Image: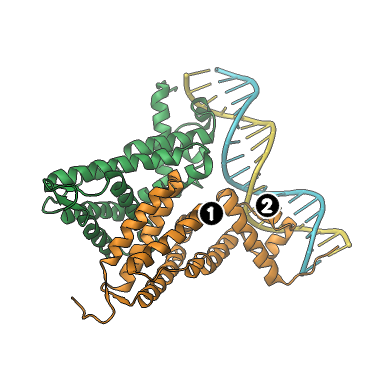
Chain colours: A orange, B green, C yellow, D cyan
Amino acid sequence: MIRRIPPGQRRDELVAAAVRVIARSGVAKTTTRAVVAEADMPLGAFHYIFGSHDELMRAVIETVTDDERLVAEAASIDATSVEAAILSGLNAYIDLLVAEPERELALLELGLFARRQSADGLMRSQWQTYFETVAGLLQYAAVLTGTRWASPLDELARTLIAVVDGITIGWLADHDTAAARRTAAFVAVAFAAHSRPASSPTWS
Amino acid sequence: MIRRIPPGQRRDELVAAAVRVIARSGVAKTTTRAVVAEADMPLGAFHYIFGSHDELMRAVIETVTDDERLVAEAASIDATSVEAAILSGLNAYIDLLVAEPERELALLELGLFARRQSADGLMRSQWQTYFETVAGLLQYAAVLTGTRWASPLDELARTLIAVVDGITIGWLADHDTAAARRTAAFVAVAFAAHSRPASSPTWS
DNA sequence: GTCTATAAAATGATAGAC
DNA sequence: GTCTATCATTTTATAGAC
């Protein structure tokens, strides 16, 4: 019995399987065999689609960069105030982190793996996507709360990503969810200090 | 020609060699062979000292936790103000990061590796050490600037570690040192908002 | 105790039948 | 195109000479 499946689809299946294996077992144990087993494919099918193990990992990083963490955009943002907006966004992320720690662990592993692996900017583009996503969210939050940002958006976005990454690592270390939320609260206040009413002049 | 060396010393040599290999090539490529080659020892010597590859990695994490990143304590802190103190400390760390990126990359890799590997809290104790070190530095900064912290020290320390980790990852992604320093400046201002004159009451 | 030689297992990649 | 069987290499771990 032969399964005739479009190459593109098989490729997607392999990448999806790799993502699951990475989340479950880590980048180090994501072997070619483990991936094809997860995808329920014969080993031979692998090299028909990907030239090498490296090529698969590269595809995984690119895919993950595109569709992961975008769920954050769906987070319901509290429009009561800028502080509330940032806090609700961070808490929604922390909820996600607590619910699926392996996912975030996998994303960090993939980032460091990319950094080790490729001389070109694979990790750079991964984080660039994060920056842009968060910049969009910050802009959205400003509109929602009738405010504007008093500091450059890309600077704020980068800082917020740093905080998210830092909260993630800290929580992965000790699972202290309450502490993570306290950090989030600290940051929310700090960001609120960089917002102004939408109609105010450049420096109040 | 036989080298008769105390087992404790050989153990230390292997751990030190492992750290160098990790920094240079990453956790994934830190094989037993690579480590003994780095330590200039025969392969057989390895299993005489460590029962397994895992045991070595565990020893590495414990060692690294103890002595790394403590160099931050030597950073000259600007006592002009709380903001200046935090900023100078973070900038000193960024200097270190830029000078030896592989070192910080290795520390992050080891943390995630520990998290993957051991069910017990190896990563937890690693970060716990960071928390305590930074808490000490924050306390020192307060004394130096004649202020006191208006928020719990452990909460501030945890947040600062999160920021340091986040700055590190962001910089590793794109090597944007100026951006890292802007994030540091943002954070320094935020921390200053949580300080009070040393003699003031609990809430001003 | 120290080292060389080798076993045993895992992994990336390919050959070749169908 | 698809899959089974296999190769070549790498890696952890051990056996056994000295």
Amino acid type for the residue under numbered disc 1:
Ala
Image disc number at residue B9: none
Q: Position of residue A117 (x, y in %)?
A: 48, 57
Is A112 situated left or right of B196 in this image? right
Residue position marked by numbered label 1 in the rendering: A99
SS of the residue under disc 1: helix
Question: Mark 2 or mark 1, which has the lower sequence index?
Answer: 2
Chain letter behind tag 1: A
Q: Position of residue A100 (x, y in %)?
A: 54, 54
Q: Position of residue B113 (x, y in %)?
A: 49, 45
Closer to us: A116 or A103: A103
- Determine whether label 2 and label 1 are within 8 Å by CB: no
Q: Position of residue B97 (x, y in %)?
A: 31, 53
Instruction: Determine the residue positioned at 36% across, 65% down.
Output: A84
Closer to us: C14 or A172: A172
Q: Quadrant of residue C15?
A: bottom right
SS of the residue under disc 2: helix
| Label 2 Cα crowd, 10 Å radius (few <14 / some 14-19 / many 20+) | some
Chain letter behind tag 2: A
| Label 1 Cα crowd, 10 Å radius (few <14 / some 14-19 / many 20+) | few
Amino acid type for the residue under numbered disc 2:
Arg
Q: Quadrant of residue A88?
A: bottom left
In this view, the mark in front (2 or 1) = 1
Instruction: Determine the residue positioned at 43% across, 23% down.
Output: B7
- Could you tell me how far apart the alpha carbons at marks 2 and 1 are, in whole angstroms? 28 Å
Image disc number at residue A33: 2
